[in-house]
Image (cartoon, grey):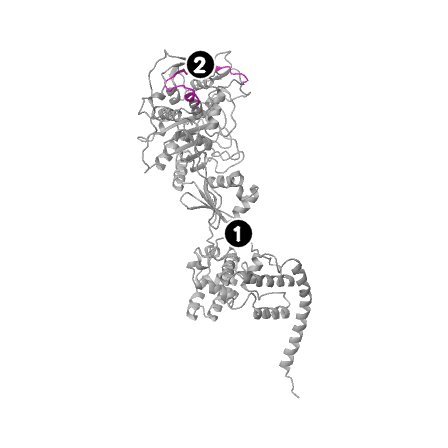
Amino acid sequence: MRIVSAKNLLLLVLGGVLLGGAMMLLIPAITNLTVLKEKGTFSAPLNLRPLSIPSQILDSQGNLLYMVEDGQYRAPVSLSKVPPLVQSAVLDVEDHTFYVHGALDLRSIARAFVADFTGGSGLQGGSTITQQLVKNSILTPQRTISRKFQEAILSFRLAGVMSKSEIFSRYLNTIYFGEGAYGIEAASQTYFGEPVGKIDIAQSALLAALIEDPSGYDPFYNPQAALYRRNLAIGQMVQYGTITKQEAAKAISEPLPTVSHRVSFSAPTAFVTEVIDRLMNSPKYSFLGNDPTQRLANLQTGGYTINTTLNQIDQNYADSAVANIVPNTNGKFTSALVSMDPTNGNVLALVSGNPTKGTGGFDVATGRGGTGRQPGSSFKIFTLAAALEQGYGPNDIIDGTGPCTFTVPNTRPFPYVASNAEPGYGLMTITTATANSVNCAYIRLAINVGLQNVIDTAKVMGVTTPLLAVPSVAIGSEDVTPIDMATAYSVLADGGILHPARFVVSIQSYQGGSMYSPTIGTERVLSQRVAAVEDQILQQVIIRGTGTAASLGSRPAAGKTGTTDNFTDGWFDGFTPQMVTTVWMGDPSGSVPMYDVGGIPVYGGTYPARIWHDYMYHALLGQPVESFPPVNPNWIPPSKFIVPIDSPGAITSPTTTTTSTTAPTTSTIAPTTSTSAITTSSLSTIASTTPAPVATPPGPPAN
């Protein structure tokens, strides 16, 4: 009779115990198979959760401006970009025989089962890379018997539809490595500041070690545990022949990383904030989701590439101009700037005017969070355009005498009394009234043209804020935004064509497909004649008027100053054929007088004009000097005297102007080479006969 040794007897007993335990575990597991079948585990489609990828916002040159993310850093990379050394490190630590076994590794499962059964610490170990991918991309990390069976079934199914390399690639881009980094590339960038293609043995081993317990082995918070586990990983790499003992010895001596290199964006810039706001709220981006919350979530995880219009060089010039010229008032008075390409509406640079967005403040440049600011005399371009459209000419004579009284109905105060910034004006041409920004002349002209026509002109040129048809609207009493004013001035710069301001050029999906790529629209809102004549008049503002500080020397430029009552807002809006820029200065929290800023009161022709000059000078360096379109002599009507309708009892605006052919004919604009005249106009020339809404405008704006 063969005597069984004590050792063998112990093994038999242990085996019996394990077998019995296994049978006990199988009973609920078999029961769970029915449940899994009912849930469709065997037949439901295999839907891996999409990779959560942040969206990139790029400037016009393709440089990264911002990552729209949800706090999780992801940077998917193809398997071909992951060096064999790094791949082997992960396989040696996590699943060395991945390319040999099937969806499951039975030996590893048995080994883990023994450890679990004898240790009493629950299920652990034994999961293949395929199983881990199923757990992270289809199921949840829940640890139950039924979930393990479901994981196994789905792993078999996944192995039947994806190759080993496809599974491994997806795994490397899905697994969490700690510090908010998901995927091998994001982890490499976070811990080492290097793409995964450039890391060494020690770094590869650390990344492989982190997979088991990203928090417990975090080198920044648990360096001792991280060092111990990394060196174990290096030992496994030696064991499986990935590296030599000599290479391991060198790798073990390498220190751990101590500083995170993850790219962080503390706060988006004003430009980026505007882009995100438009993506979340504009109907044109409905493909991103049905509401702002859904759109933001999709931007954070959808991996879109948003190509914008921002020119980073121009943005730097804009920031510098504002920083260098606005006097230090401890943030009380700031400046907003919007620069656009008038040929397509592209916003090239944007300074918000309210970097802190404190209590009561808003983004002045775009009006987000507010309604706008009074533009002062920079609004006069709309009265001028409406007048030219109705047949008035640059050499027509008008009375600029002030103070001036107007009796337009339903206006408070009634009658409305305005004054000029400077005394001494009498009869003058429209050109001189524009160059010197004479308020009384322009209010008289606006009433003759029709106040509603002035508002209609502003609307078709791009102003979106509400406007009241009151006399003071002619000199800028109604709130507007710099982005709208830049859009309106770009109409003049581009010969009467409206190009609404745009921030986004195109959007691609993560796979590279086009999601949004609109064509540039061309809507004529002013005739070529009106735009060309007005350009010539507005050049006089810079040549000899209130905007001489904006002069660009030999480069032709046109523009208009704007200063509101009590110096609460200062503006300069100007353009060349290639670029249009609007500058505002004031207190973003409210209308605060700027009587003494840097020792002077702030007119539009002071700091705003200087900011405009400094920015435009640098932004246009290297670009050819371009002239404005010539004016056909036939577009300039004979000079005539404008009879103002501003006396008591004159309560409606006429449909045509009353003129006198005996007025002086001295011309302030020399006719240039003739071009083909375009007489078509998109503006109505029917003056308003409807009483203006009741309004109480502020005191008369200055120039």
Mark 1 — residue? 52
Give the magenta part as a residue range.
386-412
Q: Which mark is residue 374?
A: none
Q: What residue type is labelled 2?
A: Pro
Separation (CA) of disc 1 from disc 2: 67 Å
Q: Quadrant of the N terminus?
A: bottom right
Callout 1–callout 2 Cβ contact below 8 Å: no
Q: In which quarter of the image is residue 307?
A: top left
**What count of labels does the image hold?**
2
Q: Position of residue 301 (x, y in %)?
A: 53, 49
Q: Quadrant of residue 487?
A: top left
Q: Which of 463 and 472 is in front in this view?
A: 463
Q: On the rendered structure, is 466 left or right of 429?
A: right
Q: Where is residue 693 in the image (x, y as percent from the top left)?
A: 55, 21
Mark 2 — residue? 644
Rendered position, 182 above or below 665: below
